[in-house]
Amino acid sequence: RERLAGCRSASEMFRVCATFNPLFSRPRIRETVAEFQERLIEVVRRDLDALTERFKTSGAARAQAALLSRLRGVADVASTVRWARQLEGRLNAHMSNLQAVLGGREACADHAEGQRLLHAAEAFRAKLSSRALLEEWRREAKRVADDFDPSATVLLVRASETDGSLSIGVSFSAETARLLGETRSLARLGVPIPEAVSRSCAEAQLVQHHAASLSASLASFARVCASLSED
């Protein structure tokens, strides 16, 4: 009891409860913890409500995060998966606190408020699932991968519509470039990438490096030509 009474925060009380969790079967310890249970369960309830509210009102925050992710070269799909996992991590922490206070998951199921919070947590966890999003991404990734032709020409000669003058440019599918970024980002998160998509991305990456090198060379060539014209 002295350990719990001496805690300066709910977090410290949760840690003490977790430490003594295996001893909750002892009547004296169970009675001591019971004095603080209602207060700590209320903390878990408020934390869960706050997390749920954050999920509901995070539309603008997610849009901003998606924009920042694009600026950093991180795919929106990976950004959404990472965001959901962060919320799920917080949810797991809150449920661990609840189990620490009540003596484990089974004890939570036998406690009226504990059972209600468990059900609310599982319903919230289902909303955080990225399974449907990733399945949709895999279908789209397969389509892009199937459409990619590693033998396609990346160096193109274009004729001006106005005077018919010729110019040289580099062509690399923006869709394929986006797929490469998404695949790298999701792989870092441990998301399984379909083998066919991985193979296609490996080929596309080689072509992309080639295209980038050609683009840099053409830019240098254009600068040299411009300086000669000035002279």
Image (cartoon, rainbow, N blue to C red):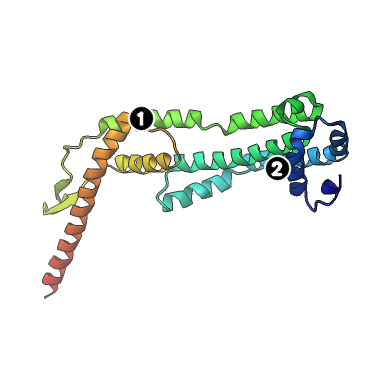
Image location of residue 83, percent across then percent down:
54, 42
Residue 143: quadrant of the picture? top left
Residue at 77%, 42% in the rendered image: 43
Image location of residue 207, percent across then percent down:
21, 44
Q: Hey, what amino acid is under mark 1? A: Pro
Residue at 52%, 50% in the rendered image: 64
> Quadrant location of the N terminus?
top right
Label 2 – label 1 distance at C-alpha: 37 Å
Residue under pointer 1: 194
Q: In the current view of this chain or complex, which residue is farthest to the bottom?
A: 231
Residue in the foreground of this view, choosing between 73 and 67: 73
Q: Secondary structure at mark 2?
A: helix
Residue under pointer 2: 50
Whether residue 172 is visible, yes or no, is no
Residue at 15%, 47% in the rendered image: 156
Image check: 28 left or right of 14? right
Image check: 165 left or right of 181? left
Residue 193: quadrant of the picture? top left
Image location of residue 47, percent across then percent down:
72, 42
